């Protein structure tokens, strides 16, 4: 842990990532740091605002031990938290094991002039301001904290089993037709949410349009219906870039609850798989690059255009039960939107991507539909049967984070409940009583029994 007086200084060869020698400090190179426990959209919002203040964003990620010493236990490991930071479109580089008390020698070594943080106060274990050194040097900038979301909020939902975060219809909520409060309050909230979706769909600079955002309206009355779909079911929420010359369109879908390293690594592996196919097909050959330059700008874009479908809260809760999803569709969608491996997002995507749905995608029939190894929702049928018949279904194999999903994260919280509740109390949040915790345990047991029954009736097809 950093001393209350001295700042942490490394020697060449000891820095966690290169460069090992100091580089020139620039006001265009911004530093932001934090725990980044859970990959929620509040973290992404801070990085977006910071990125807009410069041309590069370096993100310091504190070690598990430093967080434990100063704040309490983390839910996610350092490797899991770094993977989330690396996946953010506005992050230029992650710096693991950055000191909890932000150090001038560290930010200067990596060439950053300014440090950015939200408008909340962060203190170390001694109660002192974590940014006291950079503030004294006049190198501290404040951005607005994202309201309504934090790691503490999410832990509270898990421990208290609440469902009041669910959204019935995202489009009606955005238009102010649904939600708590007066008509004026709903309208204002809808406008703010719509603006946030637009912001999170921005490109790597955070300033220009990037991700294309669509919504899909289900015409069927039930969550597991396989009724016919119409092309007019798609609505554009935010204009963005479509597929470029020669790119393969790839479709993935899921709940993406608590957007974890399991989801992130799956998406990264999809990109890697498509890059491998691209090399095999000559995508990176000089002649192919030259041809793309003749017909338009070749800015180094990859061979695949990744489209991610995000399911509604009702759909996920129908299959998983308890109070899943822990994040609502708006929160989960923002997490997917900020991910650098995604080029388009479809809100309220159907749980079963039928042939008609896939062939009527605005981008045309996808070249591939990918699914990963993470087991979270055992089903009574195969939602990818039609993609398999079409010959476009692909699977991503095992990876280091394949078991990290919303259920695993909740179990981590439950196993260390007393430590997390102490962290809740320090933040002034309501702690879960024994009765509430036992209720959560019973609900999880009932959900597990239902999943076991489904598995008996049919060998589980898994979806996350």
Image (cartoon, rainbow, N blue to C red):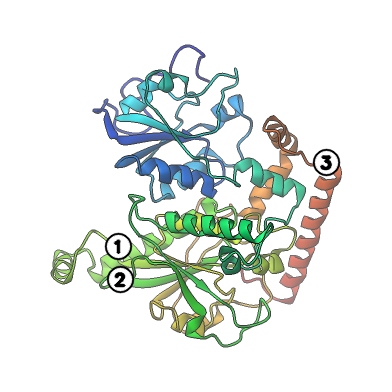
Q: Nearer the viewer, mark 2 or mark 3?
A: 3
The residue positioned 35% from the left and 55% from the top of the image is 203
Q: Where on the picture, by quarter, is residue 85?
A: top left
The residue positioned 55% from the left and 51% from the top of the image is 260
Contact between labelled residues 2 and 1, with CB atoms less than 8 Å apart: yes
Front position in the image: 27 or 37: 27
Residue 374 to residue 41: above or below: below
At label 2, counting other C-alpha atoms closer than 10 Å, the crowd grade (few under 14, some 14-19, many 20 or more) is some
Q: Return the x and y of residue 394 as percentages of the image width and height.
A: 46, 72
Contact between labelled residues 3 and 2, with CB atoms less than 8 Å apart: no
SS at circle 3 = loop
SS at circle 2 = loop
Q: Is residue 381 left or right of residue 3?
A: right
Q: Return the x and y of residue 391 as percentages of the image width and height.
A: 44, 82
Looking at the image, the residue that sits furthest to the right is 435
Front position in the image: 222 or 411: 222
Q: CA distance from mark 2 to mark 3?
A: 53 Å
At label 1, counting other C-alpha atoms closer than 10 Å, the crowd grade (few under 14, some 14-19, many 20 or more) is some
Q: Where on the picture, by quarter, is residue 38?
A: top right
Q: Which quadrant: the C terminus?
A: bottom right
Instruction: Quickly name the residue at label 1.
Output: 302
Q: Return the x and y of residue 183 as percentages of the image width and height.
A: 64, 61
Residue 199 to residue 247: above or below: above
Instruction: Quickly name the residue at label 3.
Output: 433
What number is the disc on residue 247?
A: 2
Q: Is residue 427 left or right of residue 392?
A: right
């Amino acid at each position: 842990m950093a001393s209350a007086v001295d700042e942490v200084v490394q020697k060449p060869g000891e820095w966690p990532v290169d460069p090992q020698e100091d580089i020139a400090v620039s006001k265009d190179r911004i530093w932001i740091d934090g725990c980044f426990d859970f990959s929620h959209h509040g973290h992404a919002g801070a990085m977006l605002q910071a990125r807009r203040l410069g041309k590069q964003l370096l993100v310091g990620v504190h070690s598990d031990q430093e967080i434990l010493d100063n704040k309490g236990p983390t839910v996610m490991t350092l490797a899991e938290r770094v993977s989330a930071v690396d996946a953010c479109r506005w992050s230029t580089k992650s710096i693991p094991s950055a000191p909890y008390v932000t150090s001038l020698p560290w930010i200067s070594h990596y060439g950053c002039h300014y440090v950015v943080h939200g408008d909340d106060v962060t203190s170390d274990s001694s109660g002192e301001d974590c940014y006291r050194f950079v503030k004294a040097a006049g190198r501290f900038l404040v951005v607005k904290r994202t309201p309504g979301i934090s790691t503490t909020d999410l832990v509270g939902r898990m421990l208290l089993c609440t469902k009041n975060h669910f959204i019935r219809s995202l489009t009606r909520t955005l238009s102010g037709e649904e939600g708590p409060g007066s008509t004026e309050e709903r309208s204002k909230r809808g406008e703010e949410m719509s603006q946030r979706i637009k912001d999170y769909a921005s490109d790597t600079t955070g300033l220009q349009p990037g991700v294309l955002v669509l919504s899909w309206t289900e015409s069927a009355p039930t969550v597991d219906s396989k009724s016919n779909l119409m092309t007019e079911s798609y609505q554009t929420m935010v204009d963005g870039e479509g597929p470029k010359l020669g790119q393969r369109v790839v479709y993935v879908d899921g709940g993406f609850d608590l957007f974890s390293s399991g989801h992130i690594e799956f998406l990264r592996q999809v990109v890697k798989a498509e890059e491998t196919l691209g090399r095999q097909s000559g995508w990176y050959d000089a002649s192919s690059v030259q041809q793309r330059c003749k017909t338009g700008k070749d800015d180094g874009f990859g061979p695949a255009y990744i489209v991610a479908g995000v399911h509604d809260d009702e759909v996920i809760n129908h299959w998983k039960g308890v109070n899943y999803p822990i994040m609502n569709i708006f929160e989960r969608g923002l997490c997917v939107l900020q991910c650098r491996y995604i080029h388009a997002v479809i809100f309220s995507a159907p749980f079963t991507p039928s042939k008609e749905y896939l062939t009527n995608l605005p981008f045309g029939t996808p070249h591939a539909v990918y699914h990963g190894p993470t087991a979270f929702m055992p089903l009574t049928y195969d939602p990818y049967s039609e993609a398999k018949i079409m010959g476009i279904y692909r699977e991503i194999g095992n990876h280091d984070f394949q078991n990290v999903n919303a259920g695993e994260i909740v179990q981590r919280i439950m196993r260390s409940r007393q430590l997390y509740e102490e962290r809740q109390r320090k933040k002034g949040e309501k702690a879960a009583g024994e009765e509430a915790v036992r209720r959560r345990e019973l609900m999880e047991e009932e959900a597990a029994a239902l999943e076991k029954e489904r598995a008996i009736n049919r060998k589980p097809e898994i979806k996350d």
